[in-house]
Image (cartoon, coloured by chain):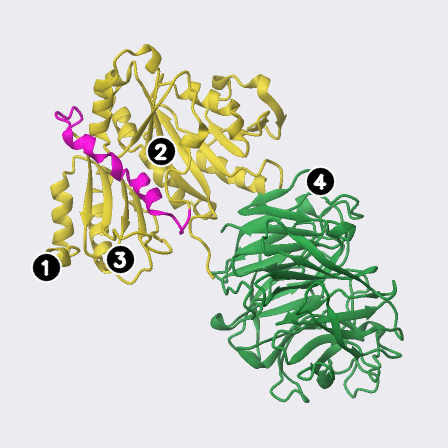
Amino acid sequence: MAKALTFNMRLLAHHELQGFGGIGEGMALQSTRGGRRILWLAHEGAPKNFTGVDVTDPRAPRVIVQTDLPHAKVRSNSLDVTGDVMAVAYQTSAVGMKPAGFDLFDISHPEQPKRISHFDASGAHSRGAHQVWFVDGEFVHMSCGADDFQPRHPEDDQIYRIVDVRDPARPVEAGRWWLPGTREGDAAPAPARLDPRIATGYRVHNTNVFPQRPDRAYVGYIDGGAVILDIADKARPKVVGMWNHSPPFNGFTHTVLPLFGRELLVVSDECVRDDGIDWPRLVWVVDGRNERNPVPISTFPAPPVEAFIKRGGRFGAHNLHENQPGPTSFRSEQIIIGTFFNAGVRAYDIANPYQPQEIAYYVPEAPKLSRAGAIQLNDVYVDEKRVVYTVDRHAGGLYVLELNA
Amino acid sequence: MKRDPLAGRIPIILITGFLGSGKTTLLGKLLRHPGMDRAAVVINELGDVAIDHLLVATSSEQMTLLGNGCLCCTVRTDLQETLREMFIRRRAGEVIDFDRVFVETTGLADPVPVLHSFQSDGLLGAQYRLDGVVTVVDAVNGMGQLDTMPEAVKQAAVADRIVLSKTDIAGDVSELLSRLKTLNPFVSITKAIQGEIDPALLVNLSPGSEKALPAELSRWLGDGNTYLGKKLRGNHDAAIHTFSLRFEHPFTWDGLNAALQTLTALRGPDLLRVKGIVNVEGESGPVILQAAQHVIHPPVTLEAWRDADRSTRIVFITRNIARESVESLFVAVGALEKQKS
């Protein structure tokens, strides 16, 4: 495709991250004691682990550190930061490999991240952690396999795990939950698989827990839909409510974002196939007044399908900015911002939740050397000044935008 | 955090002007101007502006991209339809990401209904906002047109900016200037010879963000220009009344609503244009008020008051409604009770 498409977003800066511009879905913005702002990015795949970018001046981002993985069959993909501590996920390409789990780093000196500890989740049936959520400094909530968890189906290996890191040198598991029927030996029957052309498994993706409701975990369970868990007792999470649009839809529930003040949930799918094979993958607005009975009320108006579906790579929903509780995060119960792969980053106004409106977008031009032939925006983080940081999955690196809406 | 009610909408600038006023020359020059990249221009007839040699790409019979990056569109059926289609094509990446739209109205057109047409159309209201009205007045024939054509008077009266054309061949324009200033004491007047004008002068006519600064609000209301109007004597265009009311005490929403509803219900057709900033009790900043005839645009509250002057200022451009009538109406509905105490 030719030039960038813009509406109410302005490009402030673009950084190719020293030739390693493929970023996963871990983005966090640290405010250092010295007053600098460091954006931490987890790479989508080897050879790089994570990159720290000084964005104190968002118009002039500067890479200050970029680290390597121990080998090419592991990826970090996800990270999160609380204060000066960063959790970084490790997922291996096959079961039984290491490192699988997560590391904690001391990033009080951002140029020299120091590893504090490693939480080992490797095992005969585990590929480790795909996603970590760490916003309170006390617990890591993650999608992760376990040595003692044997799934009935190999695609159901990553479950919801809670790890107590109050002593960061000695992380210990606090609790776990999986969809009944997915573990070998469960009394419940195994869940019916979706159509094999689009099925991706019953495992956990995002695991969001917010200070407003520390007793709730909002879990995207991929083909298992959205799950709300009561985690008042972390050792024994209990199901409060579930909602699954599939079938007849195409599965892959990714993020469940609660808007507490409005009793709504914004639920995103993830597109995982190129050229529209798994279309539609959408963002849903769900009425959450009754936690036991979430009811979908609208979807975000999709970008013009015919304009994007064959543009190259994936086209559909993926990550949302998640209203992180930290001091550097944009928080809104009205404006929701997400990435849509080749349709770029898009902002929606859900003042009327029955009729979401698209209010801004930015679709970068195809990055040089991108194997998709189009942009594949993967994740987004928005700061408290409405500066939008978004990343390409394969080659384009970091795009810094100003939201003017 | 919430959405900025103004910043996210694409500004529309209406360009009006009587037949032969030089509007086409102005548009022709504007279409060639290097500062017009990312602008879209909606014109009535492509043939009029002779741009065939500038065309670089045609995405449809109606929409063409010019060499300087400007999107030129012609109206086939109606303006609303054209603006809707432009937005849809923009979103699909089929036309440039235009960030402002200049709309040519036909020479004979009454601009007032166009002013409120955006408000009655859901998609247009959500994606576009009226930035302002630019009226081209012919320095040679303007006086005669104002004498004989009521639409020409209306066009000048509702303008946020007047472009005076043909001043190079017009001789003394002081009489015309005085008349325009009397007719519309709040307007800024710019001269253009052979249509040469900086497009920057034709945009940002009204506040474009909830963070608008006092200077932008003043410019929009034309506060700084009023002294001229007061000095002048003899109004040729007695039917048109242009005046500004100032209220020192805040309004309540109920009081303001009552006044505006009564005014539009009783005298809607004669309210050519109302624009103002209003101090409403309980609001964080000034409330932007716009109305044309019977249609009041949804009021927009700005983020904060940014200077010491917190008075309400409303400009009225009316046909046959005197200042005193509007004032007494505000009193009658109780909106001004506090002002008197």
List the residue tagged with mark 3: B280
- Given the image, what chain letter belongs to the residue carrying mark 3? B
Q: Residues within 10 Å of mark 2 (few under 14, many from 20)?
A: many
Mark 2 or mark 1: name the one nearer the start of the chain.
Answer: 2
Q: Are marks 3 and 1 in contact (CB under 8 Å)?
A: no
List the residue tagged with mark 4: A1
- Distance between mark 2 and mark 1 Cα atoms: 38 Å
Measuring 38% from the left and 25% from the top, which residue is drawn there? B106
Number of the label disc, if any, that sits on residue B341: 1
Q: Which residues are magenta?
A: B209-238
Q: Quadrant of residue A167?
A: bottom right
- Distance between mark 4 and mark 2 Cα atoms: 37 Å
Viewer can see residue B248: yes
Indicate left or right for A240 with A25 as reference.
Answer: left
List the residue tagged with mark 2: B133
Name the amino acid type tagged 4. Answer: Met
